[in-house]
Every structure is written in structure tokens, then in C-alpha cells.
Image (spheres, rainbow, N blue to C red):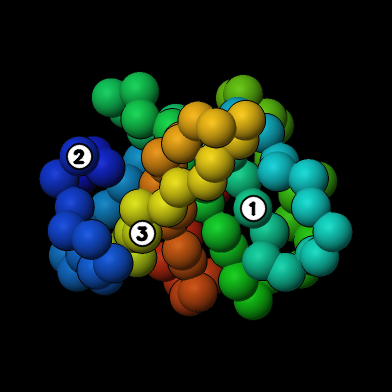
Amino acid sequence: QMDLSEFSQDKITKNKFISAKIIQLVPKIGEIPISLFCCDYKGFFFILSIYNLDKIFVKYINFQESNIVIFHPYIVESSFSYEGKKFDYYTVKATELSNLLLD
């Protein structure tokens, strides 16, 4: 298991996994990827983007209760500016459904 503070920028982390609680669906215009606001076991928040998955998957998630495990995560550090302030956050990308476990 790893937390987001242990990653290298824009890297697939082979033989590692992240476990997290799913907090909320991120509302957006497009359906792909499905984006989820998550928190890992150390309290780091991140956006999980899941590709190749039908939106019907969302109905199986109990937000703020469901946990997910992401094997071999691809982690990217991102940022945006709002009202003159810069906000940094992590995006974890999952393209292989076989690398995900949902409780």
C-alpha cells in the first residue's frame, strides 16, 4: 500500500496500490471518464478518473461509505487557479477495470 505523498510525478506505480474511501461523484459535462472524489488512508484527497466504465457503475457506490482499491495507479499532480489562488491536487487514473476492487 502507498499514499500519495510517496509517488513520482506522472508515473505508473507498478506493484503498488492505493486504498481509498469514495466521497462523492465529481459532476461534469462528459460521461467519460467517471470521476470520483476520494480520500486515502492518510487523509490525502484526490480525483480518481476511471476509463472504460459505464456510468451505471455509479449506482453501486455508497458515497462516504464505499471503499475502492486501485492497483498499479497512474498518478498525476495537477493544479488550477481560482480567484487568484492556486490549488494543487492529485489525479489517479485507472484504465484497466481489472485493477479496481470496490466493496
Question: In terms of secondary structure, where does tag 3 sit?
Answer: strand
Dots 3, 2 in contact, CB < 8 A: no
Q: How far apart are the two marked residues, 3 and 2, measured between alpha carbons?
A: 12 Å
Q: Is residue 58 above or below residue 45?
A: below
* Kind of residue indicated by mark 1: Ser
Position of residue 17 measured from the top left corner of the image (x, y, whole percent): 27, 53
Q: Which residue is mark 1?
A: 35
The C terminus - image quarter? top right
* Kind of residue indicated by mark 2: Ser
Q: Which residue is mark 3?
A: 76
Location of residue 61 (image quadrant): top right
* Kind of residue indicated by mark 3: Val
**Horizontal side, residue 6 vs residue 53: left or right:** left
Q: Which residue is mark 2?
A: 5
The N terminus - image quarter? top left
Q: Say which label, 3 or 2, has the lower sequence index.
A: 2
Q: Is residue 67 above or below residue 34?
A: above
Q: Please name whichever residue, 62 or 30, is drawn nearer the observer in this view of the structure.
A: 30
Residue 18 shows up from this direction:
yes
Q: How far apart are the two marked residues, 1 and 3, measured between alpha carbons?
A: 14 Å
Question: In terms of secondary structure, where does tag 2 sit?
Answer: helix
Mark nearest the camera among 1 and 3 is 3
